[in-house]
Amino acid sequence: MMPQDTPQDIFNQLADLFSTMDKTWDQVAADNGFQCNGCEDNCCLSLFYHHTQVEKAYLWHGFKTLSPQTQAQVMAKARKYLEKTFGGTGTPSPDTGSKKIPCPLLVDGRCGLYTYRPMICRMHGLPHELHRPDGQIMKGPGCDAGGFDENTSIPFNRTPFYRQMAGIEMAFRTATGKQEKIRATIAHMLLDE
Ligand code: SF4
């Protein structure tokens, strides 16, 4: 029987996956002649949910490297984020879609846990596609700032990354026993809600 991966082994695998993802993103962006200069259509100002226990744990792994003062500031922002976005209801308030509420980890326009940010933060912006097991291909247009032409733009193929992430998540769940489903914003993950 093969020895089971430890959580640290799995974090290393996740870091490798993130590194490959970032390099691929840079390459596809260059192929499209796109350079992200930051804008309102920014992942850091948009409502996103994250779905893996391993990304939540990795985010926390990074969070613990912050100073106690910074941790307290981030937590205060996370509580405010949930209040503004969900108003204590558990679902986004009706006008949340038009509001740009900054992620609690956004500090002076930059991600305060850049190395540890989840997958969806790394994939935002480029036109993309996902090849589903049933043969369907799901496509996304990319951000408005990129001005991507749907006929000529080169898509970022998310498929291999989703597959590898699923394998890493499965290994993490086996190693830690954390089996419950997750659908959480960054604020939820930080506050462990
Ligand atoms: S975790 Fe970082 S990259 Fe992701 S939305 Fe928050 S500030 Fe932006």
Image (cartoon, rainbow, N blue to C red):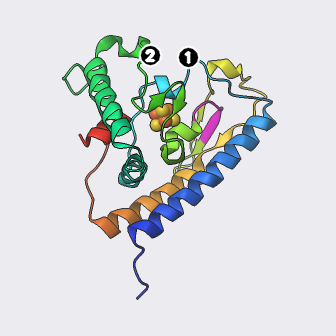
Residue occupying the point 34% across, 31% down: 73
Q: Is residue 125 on the magenta stretch?
A: yes
Q: Which mark is residue 10?
A: none
Question: Do the CB atoms of the residues marked 1 and 2 lie less than 8 Å apart?
Answer: yes
The residues colored magenta run: 124-129
- The kind of residue on which mark 1 rests is Glu
Residue designated by label 2: 100
Ligand 1 contact, mark 2 (Cβ < 8 Å): no
Q: Quadrant of residue 33?
A: top right
Q: Is residue 52 on the magenta stretch?
A: no
Q: The C terminus lies in which quarter of the figure?
A: top left
Mark before the other along the chain sequence, 1 or 2: 1
Q: Which mark is residue 40?
A: 1
Secondary structure category for the residue under label 1: loop
Give the Cα separation between the discs numbered 1 and 2. 8 Å
Residue 55 appears at what percent x and percent y?
42, 50
Secondary structure category for the residue under label 2: loop
The one nearer the camera, 84 or 157, is 84
Residue 188 appears at what percent x and percent y?
30, 37
Position of residue 17 relative to residue 115, above or below, is: below
Residue occupying the point 52% across, 63% down: 13
Q: Main secondary structure of the magenta part?
A: loop
Regarding residue 185, the answer to whether it shows in the image is no
